[in-house]
Amino acid sequence: MKLNVTSLLLVLCVLCVAEKTECYRILATIATPSYSHQIPYRALWLELHKRGHKVVLVTPDPIPNINSPNFTQIDISHAYEIIGTLNFVQSRFNGQPWTQFIEEQLMAIGVNFVENIFNNTEFKKMYAPDSDAKFDILLTEYLYGPAAVGIAHRFNVPIIGLSSLGLASWAEHVLGGLVLPSHESTWEMEANTGTNLPFLKRVRNFVSFWRFLHFLYTELLPINQQLAEKYLGPLPPLIDIMKNKTSMVFINQAIAITPARPQLANAISFTSFHIQDKLPPLPKDLQEFVDSAKNGFIYFSLGSNAKSSTLPVKTQRVFCDVFATLPYRIVWKYEKDLPGKPDNVYSAKWLPQQTLLAHPNVKLFIYQGGLQSSEEAIHFGVPVLGFAIFADQDYQVGRMEALGVGKHLEIKTVTKEELKSSIIELITNKQYKERMINTRNIIKDRPYDIVKNLAWWTEYVIRTKGAPHLRSSIAFQPWYQRYDLDVIVFLTIVVFLIASSTLYLIAKLFVQLHRQITQSQKLKMN
Ligand SMILES: *[C@@H]1O[C@H](CO)[C@@H](O)[C@H](O)[C@H]1NC(C)=O
Ligand SMILES: *[C@@H]1O[C@H](CO)[C@@H](O)[C@H](O)[C@H]1NC(C)=O
Ligand SMILES: *[C@@H]1O[C@H](CO)[C@@H](O)[C@H](O)[C@H]1NC(C)=O
């Protein structure tokens, strides 16, 4: 009996110790100064903290009102000054494709985003060679700033890559995934993808997309390598760090609204957990404006990166003129004073989007096709009219139309007639709303809590020392071997050689035969 009590105590002690060792040190760096790149993960950071882990988060959007010794936020919000210089709307009107936008503008700026992590005084102290800071894992954004993976080398920890939209194809390729230049899931190709594309269009996609990947390998990686080494000292190639240390990727995409495709074995999708349970209240005058909209109201916002006020005046007039003729009220996120504002329009620099979409009088959401906005529209069951501006937005508005929950128009060429008839159709045809609600029900139908699921996988990666069994060896194969291109080329040459030599022999035989026949005819004649 005594022995039993002792062993029981022993077991309890072991459990206590086990409980203790389960407190992990989690480092997360999200460089992109854009609200939509930050909020998708907030619930995960809070959940990890709640589970007793120590979280250090380097972010341009610190979560307000966190006072815990176990949750350190390193504020790099000055990064917003850099992104503020980009004019996404203008680049749309100039017809600049996304891949070109990256090459000509975003790559250099993206490096600055990441530099803000490295040159932060507080964070510098953590990674300094004489620092005794230790971590168990790095969660970092996988977009266009791979310098951040150098941090995983410094602390010798596994990585979980994060993407607030479909995973960028080059990261997919680095980790051993498929590159599909013409498939609908490849958002970098914007409106160029689809099913049953003409052959020549696929050739064009193939060439332009592989050229883009080649650019990223030969330009983006070296610049990032330089940056990481400037702060961390000599490093192995970043690409090797990515391949060797990436244990999982968490991708923000709802399976129900994403074209199905083969994915990395260690990729996990999540969706919509940025949507708040407690919504912030509306300003008083806005509350009255929407409450008393007896025919309902339309909410119009191009998001935080693309600004309505940077639209050409002509386009702004199209919207104002159409809005003035509608029986609905309009709430428009407009960054300045709206010139010639119709009486039924309310405009403001910033608006509590989720609260507006949750309002019972909202009839339609006119937006730029941002993924988080799409998720909110689905969550609150509001049909959408999309005007894509950049990045994955063409893909996103195309998806919404394909699902029958919205329509999309081109902002460069939109006419009053088009705009008005689309708005009327989306509001009066109830099927859009019904399909929206159906889509929401499909997304919500799942057997587990997504935030807890991601937190569990994070712990799993740490527990299994980087979960090496989840990584694919394809990542280490050269591109031509991955698709057996060398085999295809070899067999093509062999077949060509056999066919051409057979043809040659046959031709030779015929010539011989012909010569003999003519010779014998000549002999007869003589
Ligand atoms: C911080 O973490 C330690 C160790 O896990 C835990 O004992 C403590 O309660 C945590 N404090 C807070 C405020 O969460
Ligand atoms: C950190 O880097 C950013 C981007 O290159 C730069 O704007 C900023 O001035 C730097 N800050 C410091 C403290 O060096
Ligand atoms: C990555 O892994 C490969 C194969 O296991 C190994 O040869 C290489 O040295 C590793 N590189 C780094 C930077 O860890």
Image: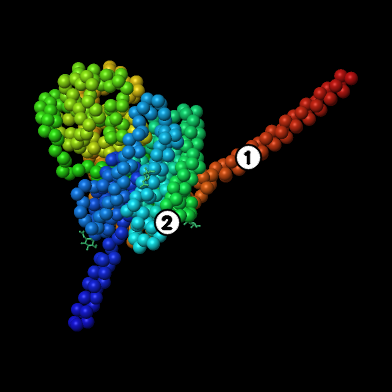
Residue 379 at least partly seen: yes
Q: Looking at the rendering, which quadrant does residue 197 occupy?
A: top left
**Count of numbered circles on the image:** 2
Residue 263 x %, y %? 39, 45
In the rendered image, which quarter contains the C terminus?
top right
Answer with mark 2 or mark 1, whichever residue precedes in sequence: 2
Horizontally, residue 93 falls left or right of residue 301, namely right
Q: Nearer the viewer, residue 415 or 502?
A: 415
Q: Which mark is residue 113?
A: none
Q: Which one is in front in this view, the residue at disc 2 or the one at disc 1?
A: 2
Secondary structure of the residue carrying tag 1 is helix
CA separation in Å, label 2 and label 1 = 44 Å
What's the image's color scheme?
rainbow
Residue 212 x %, y %? 47, 37
Q: Residue furthest right?
A: 526
Secondary structure of the residue carrying tag 2 is helix
Residue 131 x %, y %? 36, 61
Residue 33 x %, y %? 32, 41
What residue is pinned by disc 2?
153
Horizontally, residue 250 falls left or right of residue 180, namely left
Q: Looking at the rendering, which quadrant does residue 456 occupy?
A: bottom left
Disc 2 within 8 angstroms of ligand 3 (CB): yes
Q: Is residue 525 above or below residue 15?
A: above
Q: Residue at x 24, y 69 (%)?
A: 16
Amino acid type assigned to the residue bearing label 2 in the image: His
Q: Nearer the viewer, residue 217 or 181?
A: 217
Horizontally, residue 75 falls left or right of residue 472, namely left
Q: Nearer the viewer, residue 493 or 517?
A: 493
Q: Nearer the viewer, residue 4 or 379?
A: 379
Amino acid type assigned to the residue bearing label 1 in the image: Ile
Q: Which mark is residue 493?
A: 1
